[in-house]
Amino acid sequence: MLSLLWLIPALPAAGSVLLVLLGRRLGRAGTAWVGTGSVGLSAVLALLVCGSFLAAPPAGDAYRQVLWTWFDVGGFAPAIGLHLDAVSIVWVLVITVVGFLIHLYSVEHMERDDGFTRFFIYMDLFVFSMLVLVLADNLLLLYLGWEGVGLCSYLLIAFWQEDAQNVYSGRKAFIVTRVGDTALIAGLFLLFTHYHTLEIGQLMHLVASRSPAPDSGVVLAAGLLLLGGAVGKSAQAPLQTWLPDAMAGPSPVSALIHAATMVTAGVYLIARTNVLYTLAPDARLAVAIVGTVTLLLAGFSALVQRDLKRALAYSTISQIGYMFLALGVSGWEAAVFHFMTHAFFKALLFLAAGVVIVALADEHDIFRMGGLRRELPAVFATFTVGAAALAALPLVTDGFYSKDLIIATSLGSVDGGAWFYVASLIGAFVTGLYSFRLVWLVFFGARRTEVSRRPRWRQLVPLYALAALSVTGGFVWMPAWLGGFEPLRKLLDTALPPAPMEGAAAHFAESVGAALITILVVAAGVGLSYVLWMPRRERTQAFAAAPSVQPLVALWLGGWGFDWFYERVFVRPVKRFAHWARHDLVDHVVGGIAWLNLAGWRGLSAGQNGRLRGYLAVTGLGVVLVLAVVVLR
Amino acid sequence: MILLWYVLIPTVAAPLAWLAGRRSPAAARWVALAGTAAPLALVAAQWIAATDRLSAAFTAAGPGAAGLAAGSWVVDLRAPWIDSLGISFFVAADGLTLIMLLLTFGLGLLSVLCSWRGITTRVGAFHFMLLWTVAGLAGVFLALDLFLFYFFFEMMLIPMYFLIAVWGHERRVYSAVKFFIFTQVSGLLMLVAIVALVLIHGRATGVYTFDFTQLLGTPLPAGTAFVLMLGFFAAFAVKLPAWPLHTWLPDAHTDAPTAGSVLLAGVLIKIGAYGMLRFMAPLFPDAVAAFRTWALALGAIGIIYGAVLAYAQSDMKRLVAYTSVSHMGFVLIGVFAWNELALQGVVLQLVCHALSTGALFILVGGLQDRIHTRDMARMGGLWRVAPRMGGTAMFFAMAALGLPGLGNFVAEFLILVGVWQVSRWAAVLGAVGLVFATVYALWMMQRAFQGEETHRLSFPDLTRIEVGMFASMIVALVLLGFWPQPLIVTARQTVDGLQRMTAGTALVAPGADASTSTDGASGGPAVTDGAADTGSAPATGDGGAP
């Protein structure tokens, strides 16, 4: 069974190629079957392969399948090879299963769109790229998937390409993430130069065996460079600016980018190379700081957005910030757990938001929604489940279990600390505020826009399925005070080091008391959001519009001015230089030489005028000059 | 003998095409098609036949008496030409030659195909010029006698000049003259360097010869070697083109007919890289090493400058031309890094850039035939009009920005990882260049194919010929992206031979650390072998200086 591993990424790729070749000849139904079916088959296969892996774990708790040698130059021979272990199992299952549900949803969501075939070509390619990323056994192949998801994000965000604004958003996503990729590829150069391999297992072994002595600088630099790549792809500060604009694409695309693919790639990369970060505590601390800063910045931005999908986008940035925080305090497993739960509820939220937006004829503004509780009851129910999971409502949502684990780790890990703990609690409070703000504004209150379209089964089934997962997904890792049922942890222990929970702080962090604090903070957030946006909605809006508060709201709305800053410091100078130099500065020199020649020719031919007097004068002058040189020398 | 056919077939087909053109344009096209397809088939057959030989381990006992690794040559042919001056008709082919010949004839074939509809005036003469350019290119890649090399180098200039000046676009005469002067002046510098080298060699040994293999290892004072090296560098840097000698290229490309642009970008500018690899570095390894920092800087500047200028253009063809400047910057830094990784990357980059940029030029040419403009301000939203064209453009834009999965990525990665061993900053600047490549590639896509369709253009999508051409190029690039090994194996002996020829010089071992890190386990002993060999012949290095 395990030997079928290669088919998991190959199927979506084949689906994509098939759609390119057959194009419109397939018709809509055929396209839907090929596009969705290839990912569905891939999901079934992933379940089977991962099931057989779990039933009978191979030696070393990892399965490696080398398909062929990519190239072989001077002893550098990266393989097209796949590596399956506990970490990639979690990712593969989430990518294929959630990806399949999103595909199914898309069949109905995109049914009236002209680019139906093009859409599924890109979506299948997206799933393929992400699968390659998480299954790659070496960093170069990982980089192939890494860039592949970058490309697909561009293609899909700019999917409605007649609108230049969408294309701009797509380009922004690709270019900003590629800035991070520059750091990543430099990290690859560095690692290869020092260890002569990019095969991840071997590389980590070499790094660990040669550390700490002579390589500590290299390990630190490599860790920071890889972090640079992760920050770009996972939309963390300071490269988070592309994600809020990424909602220009169709809603299923947002679901795919935010949940199953793309933005969690950075989390995967750091979890996969955790040895580097364990050996370079400064790099690990940088990860924690990036995560903490991002989760707070994005949380406050999410609080004031008017666009439903933009608010969700900021919530993603914030939740990925939690994952980075977990990674930064050596809670590798907690980060993977939160990735999984987040994938369920964030996909759910975006898909539900997609139904709402289509139902209201492409209305994105939450202040023009409202009262949809009765109009779209199924969407209301599932969206609320998703929002509850996002807010980490205790016990009944998966988000609670994973987020509580991160909060506990941030305090109890020997690499954690009070600052991280407090920040993560503030983040949890803000999350409660903004996630239920959306519920109150969209589904309660007065109805403001007519509902023009209602979801059918292809949209409802994914919503229900994801809602079910958002409730039950957390039960695979219960805290000790709830019985300590933790199969996921046992699985991840085979591939990742457990979080170093030691000392009194750890003892407290894992107790019921600490959990109660988390629960209280979340409840306070949700409760305050009810007060602010249900009975006192008008007063809240008036407060936000007050002159003393308005600048802060504007700052949060614009994502803390990062775009503003980049526009002035990077974009405009480059544009200005390009415009100024567009006729090629160097060519002016060349033109200058040509002009000098021409001028010389004009001058000399002007002298050749047939006047004897002039000739004689010049000749005389020449003789005098020559004599002067000879005599005076 | 087979090597002679590569030059002869297109040379003979050229007047035939002209004659046939008097009958009908179609006849000229078919003759030209046969005149490029036949040698393409020949070289493909020879390549396949030589597979075993090329993939065999490097067996020759290091650099021989002539300094040439005899084992790496598949075929050679030597006949006296102007004996009194020591000039011979000396041609030979190794893996690199085969790759360059495949490129020459493959792109020659594509140039004939892409002119099938676009060229309607003086069709016979057009194909005459095209075939002569191809013949000259083949000769350049085959020649091992420096005079013969110079002869072909100049020979292909003239038909190229006419291709631009007669069948070109708006400022064709200006651009053709500019192209001619740049290449001619720099070529003369190379000729001076060649003659000087021959004279120095003659005085030292009493043998006056232009035979490259005999000139190798001529003892030269460091200063002289540096000046002579600059003579070669000038010629090849103009061809490549390296910043700041690139300014002929955007003009020539913009105004050349599509076939001219394809040959220019695909093969002609590759002579620069080929000449540096084949002649300049082996002849003057220490001078090249001394020049390394400067060349890396020029290359890195070229990468970023070319990319930024590409972004600034509104003429789509000019944009593509500037991307060549950027991509050839990678080639320059790769050549001057001079380790196995970088050199293999360079060879791969030559092939992949020829395919991806050639395709973009064919695409722009096709677009110009349809809407009679190259100005992107007058395009926009063309995807809706011609979706196949849009998808194709997207593919090759991705190739231009070095997307993994396509050959260009493997090439650029190998170059940069090789350069990293020599100069981290050059590698980092190259990687930054990839960000700028993203900027211009996506910007081109947006201006031409995305956005709103406001100009009410309507034209037919890709024709069958075009679909066939693009499909073959797409397949080739994807194959090279996932399995470039056949090409790497083909070039391996050449690259190994180059490394051995220059072993022991400052070029190969800038520091003990780098030499051990670039060569794998098998490379270690090779380095010591080579060092011993060059040590015995007072070939290079400071030994000959006083």
Image: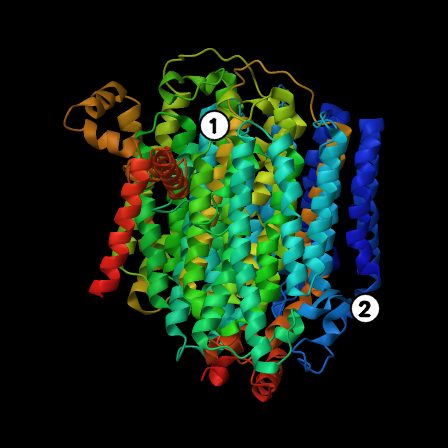
Q: Residue at x 35, y 25 (%)?
A: A306
Q: Which mark is residue B223?
A: none
Badge 2 amino acid: Asp
Q: Is residue A98 above or below residue A25?
A: below
Q: Is residue B132 above or below residue A163?
A: below
Q: Which mark is residue B52?
A: 2
Q: Residue at x 67, y 56 (%)?
A: B140
Q: Nearer the viewer, residue A462 or B53?
A: B53
- Which residue sits furthest left? A548
The C terminus of chain A lies in quadrant: bottom left
x%, y% of residue A282? 33, 65
Q: Which residue is mark 1?
A: A166
The N terminus of chain A lies in quadrant: bottom right
Q: Are marks 1 and 2 on the same chain?
A: no
Q: Is residue A66 above or below residue B498?
A: above
Q: Nearer the viewer, residue A98 or B90?
A: B90
Indicate how the structure is coloured in the image. rainbow
The answer for which chain carries disc 2 is B
Q: Nearer the viewer, mark 1 or mark 2?
A: 2
The answer for which chain carries disc 1 is A
Badge 1 amino acid: Asn
Label 1: element kind: helix
Disc 2 packing (10 Å; few <14; some 14–19; many ≥20)? few
